């Protein structure tokens, strides 16, 4: 079943554009979007998230036309390359932002997430006192803890070293499996795209150039499930976690 679809979407912002893009994302899919700088990768996510409205075409979410719906009504989690953490909150409070449930359950889920992402030692640190890679992991954890069923990732591990990026990718594969998550990921790393994605979509000059099915072996089939509590997103779509970012 399709949970996200771009239907003949076009948008011209001058330097960046989408031209008649049609793409369907099935429930539980991991779609990797690759392409050169300026090809429209981030634009595609921003249109899906509702930060930008297409000049023509439609965005369909869970079978409903959401083209004119505001971001807060779409029940998506969007993690940009620029982490957009709240500077007045420490790492723990950034992770817990928007979570539902008792404070005790929030704290338990937050601590487990921090351990999985290797940032437990940073929970009480100010966000201006952590590195770029650490900030990206905080933003990713915040997106996952909010509990939306569709996660849009825009180069959100670009500041990580190769080993940490690989570990984070494996963690995301496990989380996706255990929580029936759908992921659309923008990346410049084609090897990562093929390693993680079910489909690899290549954009060039605002158009889809190729769509390839990954032939990778399952990464997480034999791994035990994660134990991080899942906080489901709310029906009113309040799981949008970031504002518009660079294209």
Image (cartoon, rainbow, N blue to C red):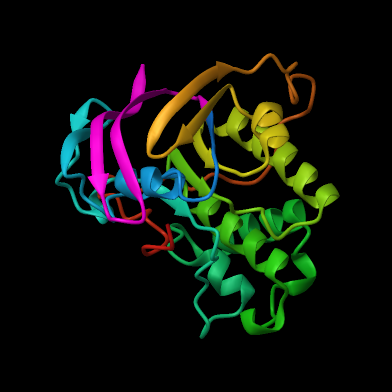
Please name the residue shown 67% across and 35% down the image: 190
Q: Tag count in the figure?
A: 0
Residue 205 as seen in the image, left or right of residue 227: left
The N terminus - image quarter:
top left
Q: Does the magenta stretch include residue 11?
A: yes
Residue 227 in which image quadrant: top right
Q: Is residue 165 above or below residue 63?
A: below
The C terminus - image quarter:
bottom left
Please name the residue shown 35% across and 21% down the image: 2
Residue 36 as seen in the image, left or right of residue 12: right
Residue 51 in which image quadrant: bottom left
> Can residue 111 be seen in the rendering of this structure?
yes
Q: Position of residue 144 (x, y in %)?
A: 54, 49
Query: Magenta segment range?
Result: 1-30
Q: Position of residue 7 (x, y in %)?
A: 24, 27
Please name the residue shown 80% across and 51% down the image: 164
């Amino acid at each position: 079943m399709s949970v996200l679809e771009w239907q003949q979407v076009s948008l011209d912002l001058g330097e960046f554009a989408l031209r008649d893009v049609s793409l369907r994302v099935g429930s539980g899919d991991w779609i990797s979007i690759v392409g050169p700088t300026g090809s429209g990768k981030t634009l595609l996510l921003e249109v899906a998230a509702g930060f930008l409205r297409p000049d023509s075409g439609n965005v369909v979410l869970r079978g409903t036309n959401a083209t004119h719906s505001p971001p807060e009504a779409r029940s998506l989690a969007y993690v940009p390359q620029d982490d957009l953490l709240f500077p007045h909150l420490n790492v723990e409070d950034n992770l817990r932002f928007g979570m539902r449930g008792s404070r005790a359950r929030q704290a338990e889920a937050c601590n487990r997430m921090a351990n999985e992402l290797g940032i437990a030692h940073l929970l009480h640190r100010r966000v201006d006192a952590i590195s770029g890679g650490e900030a990206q992991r905080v933003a990713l954890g915040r997106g996952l803890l909010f509990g939306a069923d569709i996660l849009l990732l825009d180069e959100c591990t670009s500041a990580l070293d190769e080993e940490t990026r690989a570990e984070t990718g494996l963690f995301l594969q496990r989380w996706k499996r255990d929580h029936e998550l759908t992921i659309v990921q923008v990346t410049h790393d084609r090897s990562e795209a093929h390693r993680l994605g079910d489909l690899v979509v290549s954009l060039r000059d605002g158009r889809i150039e190729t769509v390839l099915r990954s032939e990778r072996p399952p990464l997480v089939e034999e791994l035990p499930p994660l134990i991080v509590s899942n906080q489901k997103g709310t029906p009113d779509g309040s799981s949008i976690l970031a504002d518009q970012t660079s294209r």
